Image: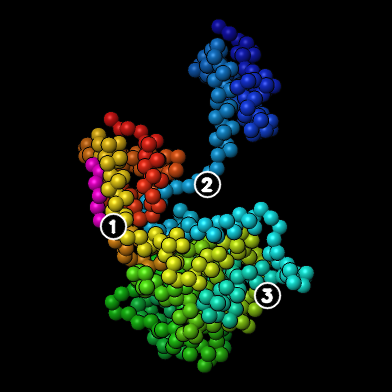
Amino acid sequence: MKSQTDIFKALPSVDKALQSTELKDLVSSYGHKAVKLVIRENLVSLRRQISLDNHSIIETVTHKDFFESFCQTVAERVRNSFQSSLVQVINLTGTVVHTNLGRARLPDSAISAMGKVAAHATNLEYDLRTGKRGDRDSHLEGLLCEITGAEAATVVNNNAAAVLLVLNTLACEKEVIISRGELVEIGGAFRIPDVMESAGCILKEIGTTNRTHLRDYESAINADASLLMKVHTSNYEIRGFTNSIPESELSQLAHKKGLHFVSDLGSGTLIDLTKYGLPYEPTVTETLSLGADVVTFSGDKLLGGPQAGLIVGKKELIGAIKRNPLKRALRVDKTTIAALAEVIKIYRDPDRLNCRLPLLSDLTRSLAEIDSLAKKILPILNEKLRNIADVFIEPCKSQIGSGALPLDLLESRAIVIRPIARKGETDSTLQMLAKEFRSLPAPVIGRIHDGRLLFDLRCLKKESDLSSQLEHLAKFD
Ligand SMILES: *Cc1c(COP(=O)(O)O)cnc(C)c1O
């Protein structure tokens, strides 16, 4: 029986491990410090286990191959610690603009523009003509005005920030009048009443959940009121006995009473989506032409660009918004500006938008194309899963997502994986399978519904993206 001291002696010194042939390459790839740290951590943990008299550890440590296995463990841990936690995934959830999966995929032109400004010094806030300080909004304002018809524009970190900044600038310590039917909660923590409070505004809710009339707005207006606000009910619909006031009447009323009218469009599309066979969504241009003084919308929802909040509207109001010190805290960085500019330029040619903007190409994908992808993938999955699940193709509906158009509207095709029923095990099999797919090198994310795992293939770019992943899938016996 060896004494603890003897067992401790079986542990290598940090230097011995660092200089070993096993870890030399690792040191040259990741550096001395990172490798040393992991060696130390491992040794500390082993020493603790030895002093606790952990027999299996003691056996391992005193084994003749211990040094080699120690080095292997260190190498694996070092490599893992350098792996990015943010990885590419394959979105087969059927939700095209999926907030948890990073929303819009960017077009190549935007990606390369981001790379260029990231790698170099840029004239982000530098006027090349005068040699003086410039304005970072100048790279986007002209484009945004051109495409929306607005007088002025500015950009912040996301649409939640846009709403916050607009409210804080135009209605701090004042009342904001809004219909009870529009007190929206978007996923996460964005709730209109809370944003109002953070912005220092007093929420004045009027009307009822299903019906709000012009007279409700009229009678709510007093000396403390500053804004009439309309919020797009992005992720729900109020149907049946309903009434809401159109933008044109709200803006007329606001202007007659000397108030501003602000519209938060949420997803905010720049074009008439019905042209592409998609459901109607109010456009930014329309909302402005109906008299909105300021319109806010997201950069990464229906616009199909990077995460950003866009604010367009009257010059004087946008000017005040830009001067608000909060703007400085909410501003976007150069890579976002570069990407957004490229995305907006794509809108100059609406005829080619659906081939050039990944978001629109996903949304307008033909059923025939999705179906043919499904037919190619089906036999592969069938082969892999035949002992454990039935696999077949079924019609399904994709969602646009991110609060844009809440209902199931886009005809699509799903590969359905239904575990072969073994009493009481269906659910655990389903969870196990979903986990296996999530553990692939590029995790494949589906949707569990009704005891089945569904892969909606709308957002699969090409067959090989998925089939190459499925090669790594275990065979289930
Ligand atoms: C999505 C949404 C927001 C928040 O936009 P983010 O870009 O996610 O910050 C605000 N208002 C409405 C109506 C929305 O749909």
Q: Label 2 sits on what residue type?
A: Leu
From the image, tell me which residue sits under label 3. Answer: 323
- Check disc 1: other Cα within 10 Å, few if <14, some if 14-19, many if 20+: few
Magenta range is: 390-397
Mark 3 residue crowding within 10 angstroms, few (<14) / some (14–19) / many (20+): few
Q: Earlier in the sequence, mark 3 or mark 1?
A: 3
Residue at left offset 57%, top offset 73%:
143
- Reply above or below: 467 against 414: above
Residue 59 placement (x, y as % from top left): 52, 14
Residue at 54 percent of width and 20 percent of height: 69
Task: Please indicate whether residue 165 sits to the left or right of residue 441 in the image.
Answer: right
Q: Is residue 335 visible?
A: yes
Kindly identify which numbered label has been placed on residue 44: none
Above or below, 420 relative to 120: above
Residue 397 appears anywhere in the view: no
Q: Secondary structure at mark 3?
A: helix
**Label 2 to label 3, Cα distance in Å?**
35 Å
Q: CA distance from mark 3 to mark 1?
A: 51 Å
Q: Amino acid at mark 1?
A: Ala
